[in-house]
Amino acid sequence: IPPVYISPKAKIVHSVIGPFATIADGALITDSIVRNSIIGAEAQVEKALVEGSIVGINAIVHGAFHRINLGDSSEIDFH
């Protein structure tokens, strides 16, 4: 859903991206909704709704329905 930027090196699987989302190189988004957020390089988002958030480089988010700012190389699991 525009406007978005999705790196050609990112992988999006069964997910909705946008509006106002940026997905960096090597990011993996699976079974998720990402809107009004920035997903850093090599970050992973799985089974999550990410809104109004920043997910840092190499950070991992599993199963979240929260607003988060997660730093580089961090991991959070809401299961």
Image (cartoon, rainbow, N blue to C red):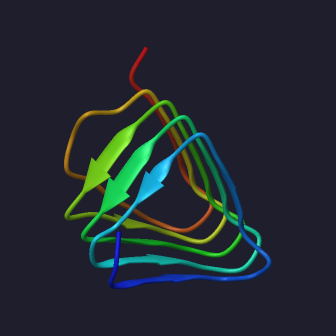
Q: Is residue 42 left or right of residue 16?
A: right
| 78 versus 76 height, above or below | above
Screen quadrant of the C terminus: top left
Nearest the eye: 73 or 52:
52
Q: Give percent across and percent down for residue 76.
A: 47, 37
Q: Which residue is drawn at the image coordinates 32% and 50% (left, top)?
A: 50
Nearest the eye: 43 or 36:
36
Q: Is residue 55 left or right of residue 29?
A: left
Nearest the eye: 68 or 1:
1
| 65 versus 11 height, above or below | above
Residue 78, by quadrant, is: top left
Q: Which residue is drawn at the image coordinates 75% and 82% (left, top)?
A: 8
Q: Give percent across and percent down for residue 23.
A: 54, 74
Residue 66, by quadrant, is: top left
Q: Is residue 19 left or right of residue 26?
A: left
Q: Which residue is drawn at the image coordinates 37% and 56% (left, top)?
A: 34
Q: Give percent across and percent down for residue 45.
A: 55, 46
| 60 versus 47 height, above or below | below
Say how many tags the image has. 0
The outermost residue toward the front is: 1
Nearest the eye: 67 or 48:
48
The outermost residue toward the top is: 79
Q: Give percent across and percent down for residue 3.
A: 33, 84
Residue 6, by quadrant, is: bottom right
Q: Which residue is drawn at the image coordinates 66% and 75% (left, top)?
A: 41
Screen quadrant of the N terminus: bottom left
